[in-house]
Structure formats: C-alpha cells, structure tokens
Amino acid sequence: MKKTCALLILITSLIGCSVLNAAEPTPPLAPKRVLLSVDDTWFHRLGLSRFTYAKAVRKAGLIPVFVNFRVLDDTQQDRKLAESLLADKHGLILAGGGDVDPTLYGKPADFSLGVNPDRDRFELALLEYAEAQGLPVFAICRGAQLLNVVRGGTLRNLRKDPVLAEAHKRRWGGHNVSLTPGSRLSRWMQLHTIPRVTSYHGQAVDRLGSGLIVTGVSEDGVIEAIESELSAESDRVFGTVGVQWHPEVRTDDIQMKIFRAFANAVKQPTTE
C-alpha cells in the first residue's frame, strides 16, 4: 500500500512538473556548453531531466550536454575519456543518484544502497580532470558526496536514524539550510538561510575532505553545502561547490541564484 501511494505521488508530481515546465527556456546566442553527468535510470531515459536539470541550466543561459557512465567500454581509459568529453565544455555538473561506493572511503559494502562502481569510476575521472583544468564544477546531492570522498572525506548513513531519515527524504521541500556568512553561496544567494530546500538523500558528508569547507548546514546539523577553498574572493569565481539538496527541482528565484553564479563563472572563467 505504501509503495503504491508513493508511486502515485511520484507520477502526480512528474505530471505537475511537466505541465508547469512545458515551455523549455531558450539560451542566448552562442551559449556555453557544460557537461551534465547523470544516472542511467528511467527518469533520464524518458527525457524527464529536461524538466529539472536541463531547464535550470538553460534558464541560466547555458547548454547542457548529458552523459552517463554507459559510454564506458573495456577499451577506454577513464582519464582519456574524461578529457575527450570535457574538451569542448566550459563546466561540469554532477547530478544525483545512488550512493557512492562505501569501499572508496573505508566502509563495508552493505553500508550503502544503489551503488554503481562504474558510475563512481567514471565521475571520479570527470571530477579530477575538470578540477585540474580549472573548470567550474557544480556537484548536486550524490555529486556533493562524491566530491567529499574524492578529497579523502567520508559519508554518514542517515537511514540509521529514523528522525534524520524522515527529515531528509522529502522531495518537495522540508527543511531550511543555514549558510556560513562570507561563503560564496551566501554571497550569491544574499541569504543567511535558504528556506525549505528540496531534499532527498539517505547519506551526507561526515568527515570533511581535504581542501573543502562547510558552508551550509541543516537545522538538525546535517552538512548541506561544501565549497573548495579559494584564494580569490570574486563572485565570478565558482571553483567547486557541492549542495546536498536539489536546486534543479524548484527553479525559483532563490535556487536559480546558484545556477546563475555557475553560469557567470562558465561564461567568464577564472582560475583559482
């Protein structure tokens, strides 16, 4: 019964999303292209990402180029593939999905759900190459977790705590995020608190990775945003930013500020 209700809610939400987003934004002339790495699920196969990720990226004035780990084959090396995919792109977005392989940060295999080592390997190569090239990187949900892991950090399992599990599984907004004063996110959004973020995750950052700072925390203490340390303070500098919530689902003025900051950096790239 619960599964049926959840499925009906999901279908209704998708239909509503489709109606509200029927007109896909058109970027300006000669827009920059960014690589958007997604999971290989029915959601993306049916093209529903055009109502979430694609819409937000296009609304910010960029062209999203979708890719997933299925482009891998036995003859390709991850580093070379990442280089070829990002060669003509000006930024990278890592989308949500299943959990990061727990063996990458010293946890047992049964610590996580929906693990796909091929996707982890593929996106680790993309992330490492993009950062080495100084490209702006926007990591969303699972992407933020992967960012923390690649920097040597660990993840915590919220599913073991019923209160945290319930608070962070609401898709259409359920909790606030307090931003660190002076952080890039707080400057871009011009807020101290982001209200009612759209959140759906069972894990989150635990021990912070090297070269990262925490810039957003939920009301119950869960880390919701991380940023790479930068020497420059310009608002044009994006660096690498990870958020645990899903700003692409509700592309209101508040959430679009993050995508516009990403687009500003993509259009006028600077180095750290």
Image: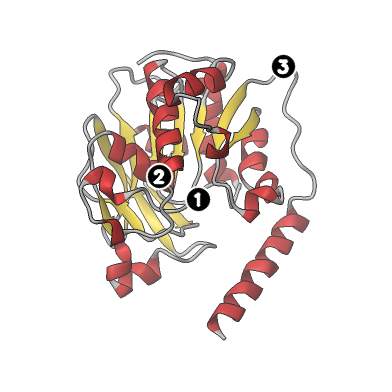
Marks 3 and 2: CB-CB under 8 Å? Answer: no
- Res. 182 visible in picture: no
Which residue has dot 2 on it?
Answer: 117
Observer-nearest of 126 and 93: 126
| Disc 3 from disc 2: Cα separation | 36 Å
Q: Amino acid at mark 3?
A: Ala
Q: Position of residue 169 (x, y in %)?
A: 44, 65
Q: From the viewer's perspective, is residue 152 above or below residue 255?
A: above
For residue 30, which numbered disc appears in the image? 3
Residue shown at 28%/27% (left/top)? 229
Q: Position of residue 125 (x, y in %)?
A: 41, 28
Q: Which mark sits nearer the N-terminus, 3 or 2?
A: 3
**Which is more foreground, mark 1 or mark 2?**
2
| Disc 3 from disc 1: Cα separation | 27 Å
Which residue has dot 1 on it?
Answer: 246
Residue shown at 64%/32% (left/top)? 64
- Dot 2 falls on a residue whose secondary structure is helix
Observer-nearest of 46 and 245: 46
For label 1, count other residues whose C-alpha is less than 10 Å away and answer few (under 14), some (14-19) or many (20+).
many
Q: Quadrant of residue 90?
A: top right
- In the displayed structure, does residue 209 sit left or right of residue 122? left
- Dot 3 falls on a residue whose secondary structure is loop
Q: Which mark sits nearer the N-terminus, 1 or 2?
A: 2
Q: Amino acid at mark 1?
A: His
Q: Which mark sits nearer the N-terminus, 3 or 1?
A: 3
Q: Position of residue 50 (x, y in %)?
A: 69, 44
Position of the C terminus, as image quadrant, is top left
Q: Amino acid at mark 2?
A: Pro
Residue shown at 21%/32% (left/top)? 210
Q: Position of residue 72 (x, y in %)?
A: 53, 33
